[in-house]
Amino acid sequence: MSTPNLSRRSALFGAAALGTLAVASACTSNETPNNTQTKGADTNNPNAAAGKQVTIGFSAPAADHGWIAAITNNAKAQAATYKDVTFKQVEAGKDAAAQRAVLETLIAEKPDVIVLLPHDGKELNAFGLKAMAAGIPVVNLDRAFPDALAYRCQIKGDNYGMGVAAGHYIGKALKAKNIASPVIGEIAGMDELELTQERSQGFKAALATYGFTVSNRRAARFTADSGQAEATGLFQALNKIDAVWNHDDDQGIGVLAAMNSSNRKEFLLVGGAGSKAAIEAIAKDDSPLKATVTYSPSMASSAISLARLIGQSKGMADLVELQVPKEIILASETITKENASTYLRLGF
């Protein structure tokens, strides 16, 4: 909390106290920032110019759906924009154990920085600790390591905020329709992942502010097939539905297929992540899908840029600090037909 200015101090404490406060304030240095503590707009980004050569090791799970595919494609494309970056990708294998094995060989090759989207953050935490101990900074992407010592920088989407955004969109829409006790369904992702749990927690909390609750929740696997299976079960369990939040637009392909085969279109549908197909469908506005809340794989591009700066011992150009921040959480935004054209370029 900042210190009140002198005129406000006078009003708060009276003129008799003003002298004492003025003396006390002279002992601090935060009244007027000096010229090294503020920074104006910089039209010439000093980080854009080629600098020290940096080798970035990269690993992410195999592309079993569009979002993961976009993660790797974005990372490769971003690295290719820099003349001073060498991109070294290692396959992640089928599970955390397989990913850990290939990452061990990566440590031996001593890249300048490692960007890692783990199969499971908890299971790969030990690798992060080992790489950091070996002097290799780790940029932890998306699925979080629980130990802050396991990464130099962590960048991820706001999973809790994703649920909050979906909950508020649905809550406001149903209130506008004067639906007092709505039937709300939820098709989550993989329940063993903390990110799924966080999304559901945020959704529950936001709905509660409207006096609403989830009537039926199903956990899918972030795939179209699992989305279709779980949505079919949801439709069978509920004769009438007012709204559904599906956590992932890839599994949403299956949700829409189940919706069409079951001829269930009486509800409002909100997606998750922001796929190109979902954004285009929202723009057309001819189906129950009315919105999606973002969790963009563009974070992989940003992770590569951050890794480059870390490898070059640079900070972010628009920030005053000399180093890249420790943690970056990207806001979850709501895409509707009104702003779909703006977000389409970030769709995957």
Image: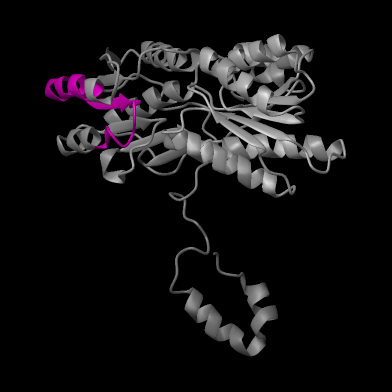
Q: State left or right for residue 156 relative to residue 147.
A: right
Quarter of the image where one finds residue 89: top left
**Image spot of residue 203 (x, y percent):** 61, 40
Residue drawn at x 46%, y 27% as measured from the top left? 45
The colour scheme used here is one colour
Outermost residue, bottom side: 16
Image height check: is 293 above or below 326?
above
Residue drawn at x 46%, y 28% as measured from the top left? 190
Quadrant (top left/top right/bottom left/bottom right) for the C terminus: top right
Residue drawn at x 68%, y 19% as measured from the top left? 342
**Image spot of residue 333 (x, y percent):** 63, 31
Residue 82 colored magenta? no
Q: What segment is highlighted magenta in the picture?
A: 99-125
Observer-nearest residue: 102 or 58?
102
Quarter of the image where one finds residue 236: top right
Residue drawn at x 54%, y 81% as measured from the top left? 21
* Residue 316 visible within the image: no
Quadrant (top left/top right/bottom left/bottom right) for the N terminus: bottom right
Residue 120 colored magenta? yes
Quarter of the image where one finds residue 62: top left
Observer-nearest residue: 250 or 283?
250
